[in-house]
Amino acid sequence: MSIIVTPETKVLVQGITGEFGSRHAKLSLDHGTKIVAGVTPSKGGQFFEHGAHKVPIFNTIANAIAATGATASAVFVPPPFAADAILECVDSNIDLCVAITEGIPVRDMIVAKRAMMGRKTRLIGPNCPGIVTPGSGENSFGSCRIGIAPSYIHKKGHVGVVSRSGTLTYEAVWQLTTRNIGQSTCIGIGGDPVNGTSHIDAIKMFNDDPETWGIIMIGEIGGTAEVEAARWVKANCKKPVVGFIAGATAPPGRRMGHAGAVVSGTEDTAAEKIAVLKECGIKVASTPSDIADALLNAAQRFGIKLN
């Protein structure tokens, strides 16, 4: 099983005719993702062609959904217009919106997130690598890849990965795959201060998924999301969870990489987060290269064989 998306999920791409959206739509199609529509205002009626694929383009999400039955959207829209693209997803009641765009103004995201309250659409991102549920074919062909993550490093299996960092997501996934340990679903939730799906949201879904046997949570300085997730794990999670927190050497008050990676309080430093994770029984990897080994050790204590 998997969470949020499956290899059968029908995906539309907002901004499919732009350079970035076009490039990653092609990569997703090459790896078997079911991209059924593109959305670019004023280009409705045209087609996005790649190899044997001929994807229809629509002016609006509503038209695309009505014609194709798409249930998930990837947003590759420039920052000034990306929040409106997210709101169009909400207005269309699509199940999932994965916002890849980096640099969306915080004020725009505050407005968008408030508009999403009580609505059907789940948001992943923005400023994220997206989500991958690996396929069972060679090199994970047949994946549902929504975003920019490299599909070929994935392998179908039983480990759930949730991370604020795209690069560290890929590092953890590759470590698992090279050890013949597959993944159920991998989610890059993004590093912006105002985002959608959180660590705790993903971990709750992984905990409820019978085919996810172990969980990797990758965080960084800034905010308290990892601390909140760790406390939920201690109280509720029945599966091995390992963590890694990036930014141990970051100076207070200075943004490091992601817009949300800035130390401003007490529980948002790397040291404090690591301490809380350990207090909650979560094995914490000391370096990114230790993540897979830490999970294997944690799984062994639970009597779980992951490969």
Image: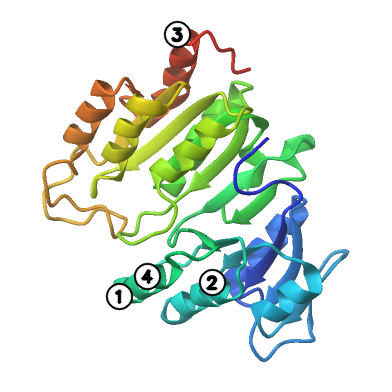
Alpha carbon separation for disc pair 4 and 3: 42 Å
Lower sequence index among marks 4 and 3: 4
Residue type at tag 3:
Arg
Mark 4 surroundings: few (<14), some (14-19) or many (≥20) residues within 10 A: few
Lower sequence index among marks 4 and 1: 1
Q: Which residue is under mark 4? A: 114
Residue 242 at x, y = what percent?
A: 40, 25
Q: Which residue is under mark 2? A: 90
Question: Does residue 275 appear anywhere in the picture?
Answer: yes
Residue 255 at x, y = what percent?
A: 21, 57
The secondary structure type at the circle numbered 3 is: helix
Please name the residue shown 46% across and 64% down the image.
Answer: 118
Q: Which residue is under mark 3? A: 301
The secondary structure type at the circle numbered 1 is: helix
User: Which of these two is toward me, 25 or 146?
Assistant: 146
Q: Which residue is under mark 1? A: 107
Q: Marks 2 and 1: in contact by CB < 8 Å?
A: no
